[in-house]
Amino acid sequence: MEEKKVDYKVNPGDGAFYGPKIDFHIEDALGRTWQCGTIQVDFAMPAAFCLSYIGRDGSKKIPTMIHRTILGSIERFIGILIEHYAEAFPLWLAPVQVAILPVSEEKHKGYAKEICQTLTSRHVRPVINKNNDSVNRKVRDAEKEKIPYILVIGDEEEKEKTVAVRARGSRKIEKMKLDAFLKMVLEK
């Protein structure tokens, strides 16, 4: 660790009963540290499981076991990710990547489904807001859910086969062809 100039701290007496270990701590958004990954040398379990091998000299040997976990508890790691990103996940990690907001559910549901199918076929995770709320309300709901992209579709977009795109955290709305939007998303 010193040779590689990695900061570390020795915790005397903090090792496991079966041998020494190295814990990796991740700092969260609030500055707290959480133990996640660990590498542990285990001198006890091989004997407890009657594990052995034949060494080069022909004699029976008891192996040393190494335990490791990259993330530690998956629940803890996911909790740290959620907190770190304040639920505003990067595009690749967001459970829903695109919110499709038809101006009128009745008038634009066919085009909304077409967009949804196109995105889904390319492994993008969209959702259609089918509520009969105002567009402003639908946009606000998508913003609260921290969805990376919002697509508003109305008469003009359906006629021109375009989408009105709004990226999370931006007020700017950009009209583009669906293929151009899809290309942009797939490149991120």
Image: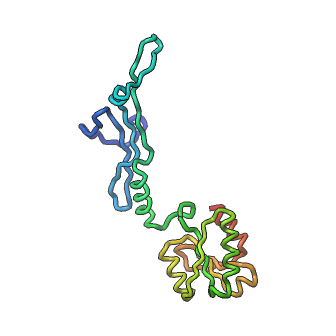
Q: Position of residue 126 (x, y in %)?
A: 60, 70
Give the quarter of the image for residue 116: bottom right
Q: Is residue 54 above or below residue 21?
A: above
Q: Position of residue 65 (x, y in %)?
A: 40, 30
Q: Position of residue 36 (x, y in %)?
A: 39, 48
Which residue shows up at 38% across the image and 61% down it? 29
Q: Is residue 20 above or below residue 93?
A: above
Give the quarter of the image for residue 107: bottom right
Q: On the rendered image, what quadrant is the N terminus found in? A: top left
Which residue shows up at 29% across the image and 37% down it? 15
The extreme left residue here reads 13
Which residue shows up at 65% across the image and 62% down it? 123
Give the quarter of the image for residue 122: bottom right
Q: Position of residue 182 (x, y in %)?
A: 68, 68
Q: Is residue 133 above or below residue 92?
A: below
The extreme top residue here reads 57
Q: Is residue 78 left or right of residue 154?
A: left
Q: Which is nearer the eye, 134 or 90?
A: 134
Colour scheme employed for the rendering of this structure: rainbow
Q: Is residue 7 left or right of residue 167?
A: left
Which residue shows up at 70% across the image and 83% down it? 157
The extreme right residue here reads 160
